[in-house]
Image (cartoon, rainbow, N blue to C red):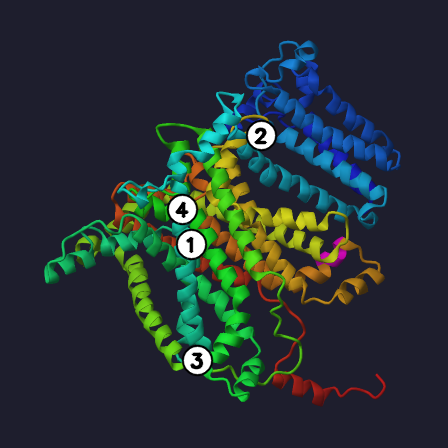
């Protein structure tokens, strides 16, 4: 794509946005369109003509200045860059300067006077902003940037704009909000919020009082990381070095936490170990062990998180163990080293990167977990639940929530820094590309016995826990041991009556429809944007490429609770007001799950030779044609991964979206949490079972529809037949 077509398309889009589309958001929805071209649906031109928004005249002027040379077939690069950047900057600055209360920046009073209130930006402003970004990209391409390829320029600049708006801007908002009190900048308030006794108290070491919420969070995350890594390592060692036949069963277990809502395990634990739970009642009846509430607090939350994270740790460590070159272990054995010494001196040091990754993942996921502490926390508070109650509790204190979010973010980045320090600059390469026919060293007897003592009881416990989830929704009251089959819970949630067609009477239908709709919209957007960004990072050379990669990965390092609070603070007031809408849910899911699409795309592109791209270029194919005809067909596995992961996470997320849902746009996970708080455990379990089934069906369907990459490989029989039927000519 050339700079001229892109520039003309950008001008056309901006002109349509300014002349036809509503400039401000429609609070009344589609009904407000009846007043077009006036009232709440007035486009920019109407607002300028009636004199209610005189400060927006420069936007229209910049569009006209950019349009004149483009209509004559000229592409003045510098002028287009200035016009595009000016449009974007002016729209946002005017939106912040004039808000719902009128003029927000008092120093502009001599210029604007008593400006009338200005609602949030609408679809007209979105079109004008998109046109401004397109003009900026066309100008950069016209001046030779990005290899003079307008398509690449538009992708890079557009992606950077979206990341700045939906990742950096919310994060900056939450960082600054913590330093304000009653609308005034107050560094003392920030210091008080960050260093208060409720956050850092160590009274638990000397009295029965609880420790500060930071220490609680750090203790829980550290224990989760250590225990999940240890259990995952035991499973991986038995699967790869133990000679057990149950290795396929171990790997099947890894899919369970991926398709299970994060707090559903907590509900199963309540059914088992609650005060009236199955195991609790059995211990009371047979051994006279008093009923207690031990499951509510650190033990229960820790148990739920380890159940969710151990299979993922196993998946990481199993892959790492299989990647270790067996010849290294064989070399140590031939030099007289015993099995345990081989493991201690060869295998264990090479596992350090995978161990660090497994621990980090468990640690970070524990920090971000909201559902399990909410359901099982009791008096054991962590940062994620404190942040929630600071926003949604009786004491509405956004500044305190922002300060707690900063503390949570600090713990997350500290974990990443600790991992980098522990690994250092040492090399762990074992796959060299040379032939390797060695056999993995068997486990030492003592280590195998220890791993078995961990693995088999944990497997049984996991089977019972997830069995409760699958069965509990179809029995009368599993919490009290009444296992009589019933459809009552399913009908309560998903009842359908036929009255001249289906009538969805169940209480859960609205949240389910909203969840599936949002997930189906967010998943392809996440996959598409992730794959495009991966292609830019892997195949294009331009200044700031590494910065763009860092921007795409930043959302992975931010806990979901922090993201939710940041979105509430950033997008609750003009110029960008999205809270309470389905759009903010989609945006949240897209940018939360974006790193998976990017990393999957980068890994897949690393296996595709650049010579294919070069061949396309030599035949006259531009970047767009190469991407569409050469690269994307070979990226189908990465696309499937991104689609499936995005859909599943959108269906099961709770930590970020708990702050963003509304009565009109509620999600399944939030509905389930509400049922648990109301004591309707069986209904919550029934709903969770339906979610798990839906996710399995959709994930398998995505793989079938998208398909697999076709790389020209043939079956053995077909190869022999082709050789016989069509022998290769000499010299061909």
- Mark in the foreground, 2 or 1: 1
Main SS of residues in magenta: helix
Task: Read off the residue under disc 2.
Answer: 576
Decide which of tag 2 and tag 1 comes sooner along the chain: 1
Q: Position of residue 357 (x, y in %)?
A: 52, 60
Q: Nearer the viewer, residue 197 or 172?
A: 197
Q: Nearer the viewer, residue 268 or 684?
A: 268
Task: Read off the residue under disc 1.
Answer: 222
The image's mark for residue 443 is: 3
For marks 3 and 1, give the CA distance: 28 Å
Decide which of tag 4 and tag 2 comes sooner along the chain: 4
The structure residue drawn at horizontal position 68% and vertical position 64%, both measured from the top left corner, is 606
Secondary structure of the residue carrying tag 4 is helix
The image's mark for residue 279 is: none
Q: Position of residue 195 (x, y in %)?
A: 45, 35
Task: Read off the residue under disc 4.
Answer: 217
Decide which of tag 3 and tag 2 comes sooner along the chain: 3
Secondary structure of the residue carrying tag 2 is loop
The structure residue drawn at horizontal position 63% and vertical position 24%, both measured from the top left corner, is 95
Q: Residue furthest front?
A: 206
Secondary structure of the residue carrying tag 1 is helix
Quadrant of the rendered image containing residue 283: bottom left
For marks 3 and 4, give the CA distance: 36 Å
Q: Is residue 405 above or below residue 41?
A: below
Residues in magenta, as a range: 624-628
């Amino acid at each position: 794509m050339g700079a001229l077509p892109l520039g003309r398309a950008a001008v056309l889009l901006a002109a349509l946005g300014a002349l036809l589309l509503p400039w401000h958001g429609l609070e009344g929805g589609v009904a407000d369109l009846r007043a077009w071209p006036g009232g709440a649906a007035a486009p920019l031109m109407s607002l300028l003509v009636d004199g209610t928004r005189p400060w927006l005249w420069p936007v229209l002027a910049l569009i006209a200045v950019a349009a004149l040379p483009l209509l004559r077939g000229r592409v003045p690069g510098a002028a287009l860059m200035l016009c595009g950047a000016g449009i974007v900057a002016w729209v946002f600055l005017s939106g912040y300067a004039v808000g719902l209360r009128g003029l927000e920046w008092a120093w502009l009073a001599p210029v604007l006077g008593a400006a009338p209130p200005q609602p949030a930006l609408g679809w007209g402003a979105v079109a004008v902003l998109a046109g401004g970004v397109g003009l900026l990209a066309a100008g950069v391409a016209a001046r030779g940037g990005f290899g003079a390829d307008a398509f690449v320029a538009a992708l890079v600049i557009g992606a950077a704009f979206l990341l700045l708006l939906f990742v950096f801007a919310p994060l900056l908002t939450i960082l600054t909000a913590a330093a304000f009190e009653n609308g005034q900048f107050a560094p003392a308030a920030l210091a008080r919020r960050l260093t208060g006794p409720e956050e850092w108290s160590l009274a638990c070491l000397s009295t029965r009082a609880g420790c500060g919420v930071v220490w609680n969070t750090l203790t829980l995350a550290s224990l989760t990381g250590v225990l999940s890594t240890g259990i995952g390592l035991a499973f991986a060692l038995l699967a790869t070095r133990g000679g057990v036949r149950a290795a396929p069963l171990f790997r099947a277990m890894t899919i369970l936490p991926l398709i299970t809502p994060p707090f559903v395990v907590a509900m199963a634990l309540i059914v088992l170990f609650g005060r009236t739970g199955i195991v609790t009642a059995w211990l009371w009846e047979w051994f006279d062990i008093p009923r207690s509430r031990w499951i509510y607090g650190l033990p229960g939350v820790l148990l739920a998180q380890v159940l969710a994270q151990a299979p993922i740790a196993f998946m990481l460590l199993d892959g790492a163990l299989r990647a270790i070159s067996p010849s290294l272990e064989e070399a140590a054995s031939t030099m007289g080293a015993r099995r345990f010494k081989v493991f201690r001196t060869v295998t264990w040091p090479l596992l350090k990167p995978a161990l660090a990754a497994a621990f980090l993942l468990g640690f970070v996921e524990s920090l971000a977990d909201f559902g399990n502490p909410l359901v099982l926390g009791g008096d054991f508070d962590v940062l994620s639940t404190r942040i929630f109650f600071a926003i949604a509790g009786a004491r509405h204190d956004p500044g305190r929530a922002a300060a707690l979010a900063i503390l949570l973010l600090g713990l997350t980045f500290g974990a990443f820094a600790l991992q980098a320090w522990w690994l250092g600059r040492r090399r762990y390469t074992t796959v060299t590309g040379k032939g390797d026919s060695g056999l993995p060293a068997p486990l030492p007897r003592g280590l195998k016995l220890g791993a078995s003592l961990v693995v088999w009881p944990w497997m049984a416990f996991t089977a019972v826990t997830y069995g409760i989830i699958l069965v509990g929704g179809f029995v009368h009251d599993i919490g009290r041991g009444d296992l009589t089959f019933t459809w009552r819970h399913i009908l309560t949630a998903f009842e359908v009556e036929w009255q001249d067609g289906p009538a969805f009477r169940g209480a859960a239908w609205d949240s389910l429809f909203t969840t599936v709709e949002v997930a189906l919209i967010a998943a392809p957007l996440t996959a598409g944007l992730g794959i495009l960004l991966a292609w830019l990072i892997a195949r294009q050379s331009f200044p700031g490429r590494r910065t763009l990669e860092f921007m795409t990965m930043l959302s992975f390092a931010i806990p979901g609770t922090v993201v939710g609070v940041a979105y509430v603070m950033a997008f609750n007031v003009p110029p960008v007001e999205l809270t309470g809408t389905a759009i903010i849910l989609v945006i949240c899911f897209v940018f939360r799950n974006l790193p998976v699409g990017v990393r999957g795309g980068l890994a897949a592109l690393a296996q595709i030779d650049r010579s294919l791209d070069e061949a396309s270029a030599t035949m006259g194919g531009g970047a767009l044609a190469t991407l569409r005809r050469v690269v994307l067909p070979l990226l189908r596995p990465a696309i499937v991964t991104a689609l499936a992961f995005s859909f599943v996470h959108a269906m099961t997320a709770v930590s970020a979206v708990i702050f963003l849902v509304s009565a009109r746009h509620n999600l399944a996970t939030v509905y389930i949490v509400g049922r648990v708080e109301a004591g309707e455990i069986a209904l919550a379990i029934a709903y969770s079972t339906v979610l798990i089934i839906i996710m399995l069906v959709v994930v398998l369907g995505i793989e079938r529809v998208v398909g697999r990459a076709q790389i020209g490989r043939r079956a053995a029989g077909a190869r022999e037949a082709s050789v016989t039927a069509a022998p290769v000519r000499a010299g061909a």
